[in-house]
Each structure stands twice: as structure tokens, then as C-alpha cells.
Amino acid sequence: MKRYMKYFIISIISLAVVVIYFAGESKINTNTERVDIQGVPTVIELKTPTCPVCKEMEPIMESLGESYIGKANIKIIDLYDEKTYAEKYNVTAVPTIIFLDEDGNLYYKYVGYMEEQDIEEILNEMGVKKDV
């Protein structure tokens, strides 16, 4: 009986590993090679749902999104759903803040928490003025 239980447990673990592997692969969206740029600079927060610092950044990114409508794209991307971004931007820790110019080229990359005014300074360097 113990021998069958051991085989059963090994089978279940093997099956779970296979399911996790293929489930993770199927979530990659191959159409995410470029963010929708629309000819304006873009700020992307690359995050995970379990990252506490990423959660602190969300209200900042939402506020920036409201302040820069039509002048800059402000995006929050969950790396669990969009794994291609982690590879594309060589993400080693979250949050990672990516600044892209109007042509989609990398302008600046920062790992960690960023204050709203620091993000605004970089956008200002990129020639983007905040709505008053």
C-alpha cells in the first residue's frame, strides 16, 4: 500500500509541474512586443501583484495618467500576465519603471519606488509638460 501511495504522490507532483509549466506559457501574449505608443512618451510600471512597493506606486501612476492625458502614455503592466516585458527590459526586480521616447526607444530605466515628482522631472526632461 505504501508503495502505491508513493507512486501516486510522485505522479501528482509530476502532473502539477507540467500543468504549471504549460499554464504559465499560455498566458504570454505575443502581441506585446510594443506598447501602444501613439507618438508620445510612455512611462511603464512593470509590477507583480504580490509586490508591496508596486502597490504603493499604483496611485502615483494613476494620478500621472490623469495629469498627462494626450501628452504621455502611463501604463501599469503585471509581469505575471505579460512575461515578455520582463525579458525585453531585462527586469531583475519590481517595480521597474521604464521611460520610452515618442518612438518607443528606451529613454530611462529605474528599479524601485519613484516619487511622483521624480517621474514628472524625467517627463519634463523628455519635453512633456504637465496639465495644470
Image: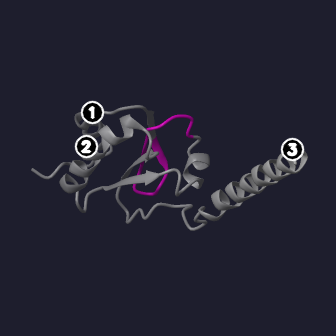
The residue labelled by disc 3 is: 2
First in sequence, mark 3 or 1: give its number.
3
Residue at 88 percent of width and 51 percent of height: 4
Q: Is residue 30 above or below residue 116?
A: below
Magenta stretch holds residue 53: no
Q: Is 123 left or right of 98, judged from the image as shown?
A: left
Disc 3 secondary structure class: helix
Q: Which residues are magenta?
A: 91-107
Determine crowd level at label 3: few under 14, some 14-19, many 20+ residues with C-alpha closer than 10 A. few
Q: Is residue 43 above or below residue 91?
A: below
Residue at 18 percent of width and 49 percent of height: 130
State how far apart marks 2 and 1 are (Cα). Answer: 8 Å
Tag 3: amino acid = Lys
Q: Is 87 left or right of 73, judged from the image as shown?
A: right
Q: Residue 39: horizontal and vertical position, in percent?
A: 37, 63
Determine crowd level at label 2: few under 14, some 14-19, many 20+ residues with C-alpha closer than 10 A. some
- In the depicted view, which residue is nearer to us: 125 or 98? 98
Determine crowd level at label 1: few under 14, some 14-19, many 20+ residues with C-alpha closer than 10 A. few
Q: Residue 84: horizontal and vertical position, in percent?
A: 59, 54
Q: Name, please, the residue furthest toward the front.
A: 1
